[in-house]
Amino acid sequence: MTILARLIFMSKETISSPLSTWAQNIAPSPTLAVDAKAKAMRAAGKDVCGFGAGEPDFDTPKFICDACAKALAEGKTRYVPTPGILPLRKAIAADYTSRGFKGIDETCVVVSPGGKMSCYLTILSLVSPGDEVLIPAPYWVSYPEMVKLAGGSVKVLPTSDADAFKISAEQLKAALSPRTKLLILTSPSNPTGAVYSRAEIEAIVKVAVEAGVYTLSDEIYSSLTYDGAEAVSPATLSDEAARFVATASGFAKSYAMTGWRLGTLVAPKAIASAVSKLQSQMSSNCTTFAQYGALAVYENPELAKKSVAEMRAVFDRRRQMLCDGLNAIAGITCYRSQGAFYLFPNISSFGLHSTEFAEKLLEEELVAVVPGIAFGAEGYVRISYATSDEILKKGLTRIANFCSRLAKKS
Ligand SMILES: *Cc1c(COP(=O)(O)O)cnc(C)c1O
């Protein structure tokens, strides 16, 4: 950057700080912060109902842990190819091919340290300074910050529970500009749990492809859909779409492997190669023996299917209980979302800022939720049902008490 550009870019305050503009302009993850606060309160002996977590409350299936332990015992502890061990990439390519992806082989696959890194490296590979990235809101907290780190600018496409938290093709069309480079789609969504139908995805991707705009499709929750909803991969819709879509996913949410740090990217070869090149300079390969654990998913398809189905059934039961329970509370309306493990109830009738609502709820009733504003949507909170039935029931009672006090005050 030239000195002039630096001066224009930096504000007065940032000039006196030793930290870079990148470090100063990036917000810390609010979801991790809520979770950390709830955990700290629990460690201090408080009986907190934690609905802030963005991770399954299950243990990683044993057959996956066993495969990892075996690899470790066999000395699989050295560097491997940056984009991932060949058998894992081949297995991922075969799995995506079986799900309707065309022209995919291991050169289109990168295994990254987490789905988060898959998203970030894809953004870094596609977005130059000045490029515009379209992000439907409510959005996953990390996307805008990742775009900022790439020097791109964010254009938010707002949605509400009245549109089932989904953008329309017309909304996308109206938001396009000559600078638009990328659209980020997340279905099922974190934080809303909304799932786009095939027809909705088709209409959206058609507009994007016709405009030459790339799509980053974050499909980390694709195995968690309910009420017969189907997670449709934009890349499978047409040969054209396949050229413009990068699909990020990972093992964290489907197999309760959040701590393993294993994400995947399936993309046109040029994008996959760029992501691999960036990864070679930033992290090298992800943990070698962890990759052998993930490989067990493809080597034991029946076991893998069974563990996903078991977790899915539990999430579904909790989703229904929580959604019904929230809708029974006067003042709350909750959209019945069909995916992931979150609900995004509307709390706007109480007239409190979502941050204030969440803070008071934590202080007064020891229930941790994430304020909607963290996801770019005021008037809502995110509630994760990746927690036990017992905590869900207790938490619901506390939320009901809290809301009835609020209603009396106003
Ligand atoms: C959890 C999550 C990810 C990635 O998680 P990793 O732990 O990095 O694999 C990506 N996108 C969304 C929307 C998520 O909720």
Image (cartoon, rainbow, N blue to C red):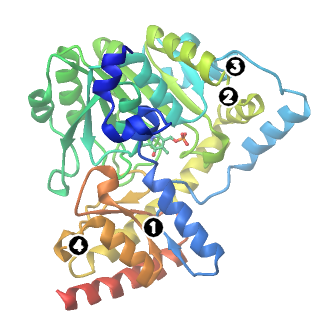
Q: Which amino acid does label 2 sit on?
A: Cys
The numbered disc on residue 318 is 1
Quadrant showing the C terminus: bottom left
Sequence-wise, which precedes: disc 4 or disc 2?
2
Q: What residue type is labelled 3?
A: Pro
Residue at image mark 2: 286
Sequence-wise, which precedes: disc 1 or disc 2?
2
Rendered position, 260 above or below 184:
below
Rendered position, 180 above or below 10:
above
Sequence-wise, which precedes: disc 1 or disc 3?
3
Q: Is mark 2 on a helix, strand or loop?
A: loop
Q: How far apart are marks 1 and 2 (CA)?
A: 33 Å
Q: Distance between the residues labelled 4 and 2?
A: 43 Å
Question: Does the closest atom of ligand 1 sit within 8 Å of the Cβ of label 3?
Answer: no
Q: Quadrant of residue 373?
A: bottom left
Q: Which residue is drawn at 61% across and 17% down?
A: 281
The numbered disc on residue 87 is 3
Give the x, y percent position of residue 12: 32, 38
Number of marks in the rendered image: 4
Q: Which residue is drawn at 54% across and 28% down?
A: 264
Work out whether residue 65 or residue 4 is closer to the camera in this orientation and state it.
4
Work out whether residue 55 or residue 324 is closer to the camera in this orientation and state it.
55
Sequence-wise, which precedes: disc 3 or disc 2?
3
Q: Distance between the residues labelled 4 and 1?
A: 27 Å
Sequence-wise, which precedes: disc 3 or disc 4?
3
Q: Which amino acid does label 1 sit on?
A: Arg
Work out whether residue 145 or residue 47 is closer to the camera in this orientation and state it.
145
Q: Which amino acid does label 4 sit on?
A: Leu
Tell me if residue 291 can be seen: yes
Rendered position, 45 above or below 74:
below
